[in-house]
Image (spheres, rainbow, N blue to C red):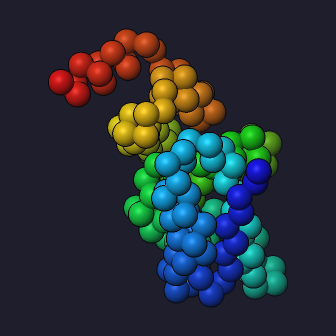
Amino acid sequence: MTIIITINNHTINNLELSPALTVIEPLMQNKSIGSYEQQLQFEINYEQEVGDPRELSEIPELRLWFVRLDARYPWLPFLLDWKAGELARYTAMLVPHQFMSKEGIQYNPEALEIFLMHKIFILSDWLKQQSIPNKFRLKSFAQILGYELDDAFFELIKKGDG
């Protein structure tokens, strides 16, 4: 089941999260939020001026909307439909990058690493609170962004939790 959040110029320019809230809040009330893993997609209806060559992730207003959403739901990557490219698009909204005609999106490496580690820590804690096994999921998340996480890293996190 695909879950869609539709946003447009009005919601973006007014930093209005209501389209996301009306979708995500009921999912949070459900005791089995894990059943919605990787099912969320965004439909972005952002009208650009004619001749505006920017990709959506290069539009500051749109990026700011996603920054606000991420502040509200920092564990949201768990719900994103990774296969449909939603994780890559979400990451592009939050991490500085450039578009290369042949290579595609090129994230700032240091910013991507900070983003990844931040999300790993958030998701690790959140998944544990939800009683959802996390090691495989977190490794997959890192792999999609081009990183390999060693098992020793997860032992370090576990040890750090006391």
Asked whether 152 or 128 is in front, the reply is: 128
Query: On the rendered structure, is 7 left or right of 156?
Result: right
Asked whether 19 or 106 is in front, the reply is: 19
Q: Is residue 79 above or below residue 149?
A: below
Q: Tell me where residue 49 appears, x and y as whole percent.
A: 75, 85
Q: Tell me where residue 101 appears, x and y as whole percent.
A: 78, 49
Q: Toward which corner of the image does residue 146 lie, by quadrant?
A: top right
Residue 127 visible here: yes
* Farthest residue, direction left: 162
Q: Toward which corner of the image does residue 143 lie, by quadrant?
A: top right
Residue 54 visible here: no
Q: Tell me where residue 152 appears, x and y as whole percent.
A: 37, 12
Q: Image point 43% across, 40% down: which residue? A: 130
Count of all numbered marks drawn on residues in the image = 0
Q: Is residue 25 above or below residue 98?
A: below
Q: Image point 49% across, 48% down: which residue? A: 31
Quadrant position of the C terminus in the picture: top left
Q: Is residue 87 above or below residue 73?
A: above
Query: On the rendered structure, is 72 left or right of 78?
Result: left
Q: Image point 30% across, 24% down: which residue? A: 157
* Farthest residue, direction top: 152
Asked whether 37 or 48 is in front, the reply is: 37
Q: Image point 45% across, 68% down: which residue? A: 68
